[in-house]
Image: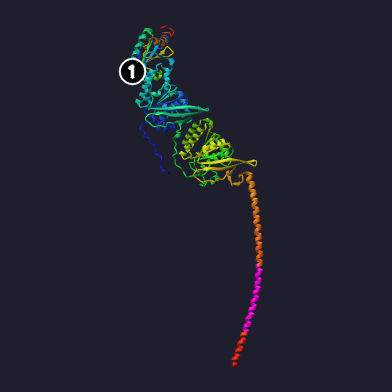
């Protein structure tokens, strides 16, 4: 692993902080709210101020051993308890344990007549009594601006509030004061002037009929903090804030290879699979088997003993599992074993940011090795926003070393091509699935447009979805490109015929040759026989000649001896 | 501690006399405003309700737990427990007209 190139910016925590226990919020504030000081949480109606405050208090009591007082100026204690019980907050139980105190302050203008000077000492007494009775370290005042409707003298109220916040600081109480968003300022009564240590703004924006909750730390005296608007989520698990832009381009790159789950596809890649931690785009029109390949991918991950999180936006988890059975994949057993988890939601259910926030939370909870998002094209919205969301989604996965498979339903029209390419530059690998229509039939092909950091096949390959899964077929390339389906079959038949003819030809030639060889050999034999005969005759003649020579010699000897005798 | 200031002319307890006033004054320590409020209260009780009133003074510094019960925020607060309905008047009671109207001793429509 390369050394950490960017110097980590460590900010010394000089200011003591009180953790809120709200997922993500403590990250962007580098520890939580300023301890021993009041913080202002403001926002319009229904943006989650009370829940934020209550979560801060309950987490303080249950996780950090800091009892808290909830002073409610709006809701009655019973209503509060009922409202948060769905989040698993047991206010009555906490109150019985002495870890939480709720005081409902009822302010009704019509019941109060004013005559002469007064102050709000009663409020101080009540708060002080509640704090002392349980030894509280945390206080929530929700929503204190209600007082302005109960009393006629705003000047006096402001002075009293200033005194109250001073009193809170003096007592070292970590307080959350909620305020309704006002026109032109953060709160109706300009509370931000008094509570200036930390101001958190909650927002609930509706764009195209889709609501997105956002949170921003407007100011935080004496501390660094994330300054962006962060989407946050309120659901059955409470509040979670997503620090989306925290991820930089500084992350380890793994050279480990993981299987795509389709053997033929792995074979198209030199390294035999895809890099762990990479982002893979699987694009194709309807019915090309994106989800099926994605199911393979998930199945392969679970087989390796990894954890896979499957985000589905167009189908239900049950449908995916059922459909996977038809290609021989038993995803349900992984679900039962806890290594595979489906998160299904309609894209229109939340805004993009909310989806991101939800995914972030799910990633934190499930800690997957592999993530499938099926399909990303389901996200609708302005191009730039969708692009930014997907970028952050990818960053999110990459920063955690999670391998991500994104499917995209691309129409064949050229209009969407650009959009896909804009996205593709973010992707490490892009597998394109295509429908090829020819000869009155439709066949599926795939090819790798890119695979960063590894050589890969450039071939267009046909694949079939069979009972045993996705199968890549040996390619047949004709003059008009790759041949698929019956064209491939007929081409195969044609090639078979050619082969047979060629084989027959070769056979015939071989037979001819053998025949020729036989004839020649016979001829050679005959000639050799003739030669032999001639040789025999010659030898005979030579032998006769020798004998004759010998006789002549004998004769000469005899003659000589005769001559000698005569001499 | 509840500073009970019964008056000799007080009607016996439990008397459902509709004209009987049960008043409770919440204070927090012996502040100027509190003392002024108590003095003002005593004065016009004597003037308008002689013989049929009862004043209870509650010092929240001594009994802080009582503040929540009567929804006390402002100090001083005068609460009319009886006759019903419950009425609250806050301040040092220096505006006598407002107090008398607030306690229904003088009808609202009456000219000042």
Q: Is residue A143 above or below residue A378?
A: above
Asked which quadrant contains residue A470, the reply is top right
Which portion, as a residue range, is magenta? A524-551
Where residue A323 appears, as percent x and y from the top left, is 58, 38
Where residue A133 appears, as percent x and y from the top left, is 37, 25
Indicate whether residue A540 is drawn in magenta: yes
The residue where tag 1 is placed is B29
Q: Which of A285 and A204 is in front in this view?
A: A285
Where residue A174 appears, as percent x and y from the top left, is 38, 27
Q: How many residues crowd around disc 1 within 10 Å: few (fewer than 14), some, or many (20 or more)?
A: some
Q: Nearer the viewer, residue A399 or A36?
A: A399
The kind of secondary structure element at disc 1 is: loop
**Chain for mark 1?**
B
Indicate whether residue A150 is drawn in magenta: no
At 61% from the left and 86% from the top, the residue drawn is A554
Where residue A375 appears, as percent x and y from the top left, is 54, 36
**Extreme front residue here?**
A567
């Amino acid at each position: 692993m390369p050394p950490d190139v960017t110097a980590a910016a460590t900010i010394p925590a000089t200011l003591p902080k009180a953790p809120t226990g709200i997922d993500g919020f403590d990250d962007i504030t580098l520890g939580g709210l300023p301890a021993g000081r009041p913080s202002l949480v403001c926002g319009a109606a229904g943006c989650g101020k009370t829940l934020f405050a209550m979560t801060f208090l309950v987490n303080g009591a249950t996780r950090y051993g800091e009892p808290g007082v909830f002073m409610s100026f709006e809701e009655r204690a019973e209503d509060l308890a009922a409202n948060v019980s769905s989040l698993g907050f047991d206010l009555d139980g906490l109150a019985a344990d002495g870890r939480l105190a709720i005081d409902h302050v009822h302010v009704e203008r019509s019941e109060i007549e004013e005559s002469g000077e007064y102050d709000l000492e009663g409020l101080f007494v009540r708060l002080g009594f509640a704090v002392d009775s349980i030894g509280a370290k945390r206080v929530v005042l929700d929503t204190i601006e209600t007082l302005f409707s109960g009393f006629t003298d705003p000047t006096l109220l402001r002075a009293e509030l200033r005194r109250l916040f001073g009193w809170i600081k003096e007592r070292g109480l970590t307080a959350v004061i909620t305020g309704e968003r006002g026109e032109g300022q953060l709160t109706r009564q300009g509370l931000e002037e008094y509570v200036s240590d930390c101001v958190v703004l909650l927002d609930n924006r509706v764009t195209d009929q889709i609501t997105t909750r956002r949170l921003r730390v407007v100011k935080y005296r004496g501390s660094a903090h994330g300054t962006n608007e962060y989407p946050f989520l309120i659901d059955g698990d409470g509040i979670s804030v997503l620090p989306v832009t925290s991820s930089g381009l500084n992350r380890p790159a793994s050279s480990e290879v993981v299987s795509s789950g389709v053997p033929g596809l792995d074979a198209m890649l030199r390294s035999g699979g895809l890099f762990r931690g990479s982002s893979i785009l699987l694009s194709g029109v309807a019915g090309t088997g994106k989800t099926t390949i994605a199911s393979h991918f998930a199945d392969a991950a679970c087989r390796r003993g990894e954890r896979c999180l499957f985000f589905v936006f167009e189908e239900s988890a049950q449908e995916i599992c059922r459909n996977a059975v038809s290609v021989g994949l038993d995803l349900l057993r992984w679900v039962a074993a806890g290594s595979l988890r489906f998160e299904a939601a309609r894209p229109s259910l939340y805004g993009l940011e909310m989806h991101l926030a939800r995914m972030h939370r799910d990633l934190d909870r499930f800690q997957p090795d592999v993530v499938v998002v099926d399909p990303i094209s389901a996200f609708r919205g302005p191009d730039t926003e969708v692009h930014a969301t997907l970028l952050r989604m990818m960053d999110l996965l990459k920063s955690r070393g999670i391998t991500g498979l994104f499917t995209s339903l691309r129409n064949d029209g050229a209009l969407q091509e650009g959009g896909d390419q804009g996205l593709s530059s973010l992707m490490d690998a892009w597998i394109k699935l295509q429908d090829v229509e020819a000869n009155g039939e439709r066949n599926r092909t795939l090819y790798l447009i890119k695979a960063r950091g590894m050589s890969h096949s450039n071939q267009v390959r046909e694949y079939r979805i069979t009972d045993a899964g996705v199968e890549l077929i040996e390619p047949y390339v004709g003059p008009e490109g790759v041949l698929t389906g019956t064209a491939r079959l007929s081409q195969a038949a044609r090639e078979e015929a050619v082969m047979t003819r060629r084989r027959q030809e070769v056979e015939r030639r071989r037979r001819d040759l053998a025949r020729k060889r036989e004839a020649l050999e016979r001829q050679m034999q005959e000639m050799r026989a003739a030669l032999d005969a001639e040789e025999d005759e010659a030898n005979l003649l030579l032998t006769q000649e020798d004998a004759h020579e010998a006789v002549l010699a004998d004769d000469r000897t005899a003659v000589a001896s005769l001559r000698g005798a005569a001499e | 501690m509840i500073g009970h200031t019964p008056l000799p002319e007080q009607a016996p307890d439990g008397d459902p006399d509709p004209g009987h006033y049960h008043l409770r004054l919440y204070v927090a320590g012996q502040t100027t405003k509190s003392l002024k409020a108590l003095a003002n209260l005593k004065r016009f009780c004597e003037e308008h309700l002689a013989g049929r009133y009862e004043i209870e003074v509650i010092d929240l510094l001594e009994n802080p737990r009582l503040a929540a019960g009567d929804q006390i925020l402002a100090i001083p607060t005068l609460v009319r427990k009886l006759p019903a309905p419950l009425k609250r008047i806050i301040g040092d009671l220096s505006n006598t007209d407002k107090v008398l109207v607030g306690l229904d001793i003088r009808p609202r429509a009456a000219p000042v």
